[in-house]
Amino acid sequence: MSGEMVVKDNALINASYSLSLVEQRLILLAIIVTREHQHNMQWDFKLGMPIKITASQYIDAFGVSRQTAYESLREACKTLFNRQFSYQEKSEEINGYWYKTSRWVSDIAYLNETATVSFTFAPAVLPLITELEQHLTSYELQQVANLSSAYAVRLYEVLIAWRSAGKTPKIKVADLRNRLGILKNEYERMSNFKSRVLEPSIKQINEHTDISVKYEQHKEGRTIEAFSFAFKVKKDNKKAVGNSKRDPDTPDLFTNYTDKQLARAVHSKKFIADYNSLVSAQNPANQSSGAWISHMVEWIKKDPERFTKRPMEEYLNDEQAKRF
């Protein structure tokens, strides 16, 4: 599944939850399948439809043996239904945030004969993976496919949300633990947290993903109160992009433009005028600005050569459309 995109609202990136590696992988595959269905208008994603993940898909994405895939999916099916996550959602009525908790799935089933997992995302999850405007993070599934630690996958997501800056602000220890899904009674000593979670995760990220990262610890007195991270795209990855035959004005999500910039560009009046004819009047993408942004950003990722009428900077500097 090389090149497949995982896209999440930043509220989900910053959410607090604990999932095993297999559970995380199932969720990532399901996000890809859901957004593919949405892109192809194969069903009304707002209704919530069962997503099927087969052992073959799991093997193809993560390079495990068939026996491992069968056993892992069977076990994950037993535990995923009870998993929860907590996140913040800005209130539209008052100046504040709702602190919300939701399950990941509404139902889940396992077909033993083909080692297929079928589940329906909970209603709270769908907007966080489909109705995206500017506050989104995306990356290629292959970047985390070889990470063997659930903590490493989560840390990579936390970092890549700051792709455009190449560094994070200070993250308090408690916040970082929550984002990585570490329970209160786990790795309570800082030495254990660093040696068992933080440093192994960074080692895996540096070895297997497109970025190189280092961390800095921030103390108050003798106590470590926060961490910050700095990272850069590896030279090999930049070289590969440099050898691409794409038009220099074609958007490249991983080098030239951030997710936020792409969302802003596709919402500009010039972009809509240039490419509105590509989308039929009956397409759900024409129903709201959020749907348009989500649809077009995904399209750019999959077929960037289609969008070369103007330099991207012209769209970024253009007046942004208000609402559809």
Image: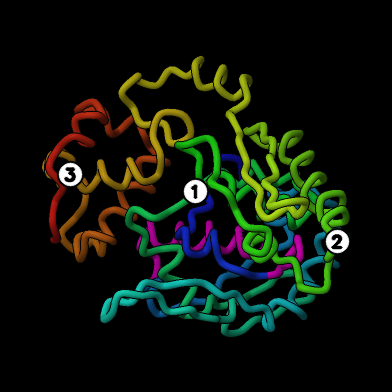
Give the image's coloring scheme.
rainbow
Which residue is pictured at 57% across the width and 63% down the height?
Answer: 30
Q: Is residue 188 above or below residue 232?
A: below
Q: Position of residue 220 (x, y in %)?
A: 68, 52
Find the magenta span and give its range.
18-43
Q: Residue furthest front?
A: 221
Query: What element does badge 3 sit on?
Result: loop
- The quarter of the picture where the C terminus appears is bottom left
Q: Which residue is mark 3?
A: 268
Amino acid carrying mark 1 in the image: Ser
Q: Real-space Cα distance between discs 3 and 1?
A: 21 Å
Q: Which residue is mark 1?
A: 138
Which residue is pictured at 14% across the width and 37% down the height?
Answer: 318
State which quadrant residue 103 falls in.
bottom right
Q: Is residue 287 magenta?
A: no
Query: What element does badge 2 sit on?
Result: loop
Q: Real-space Cα distance between discs 2 and 1?
A: 33 Å
Q: Position of residue 231 (x, y in %)?
A: 61, 34
State which quadrant residue 28 falls in.
bottom right
Q: Is residue 34 magenta?
A: yes
Q: Residues within 10 Å of mark 1 (few under 14, many from 20)?
A: many
Which residue is pictured at 40% across the width and 44% down the height?
Answer: 259
Name the main secondary structure of what is drawn in magenta. helix
Question: In this figure, what is the number of numbered marks?
Answer: 3
Q: Nearer the viewer, residue 147 or 281?
A: 147
In primary-sequence order, the first of circles 3 and 1 is 1
Query: What element does badge 1 sit on?
Result: strand
In primary-sequence order, the first of circles 2 and 3 is 2
On the picture, is 182 further left or further right than 294?
right
Q: Real-space Cα distance between discs 2 and 3?
A: 50 Å
Q: Position of residue 308 (x, y in %)?
A: 26, 28
For residue 36, the mark is: none
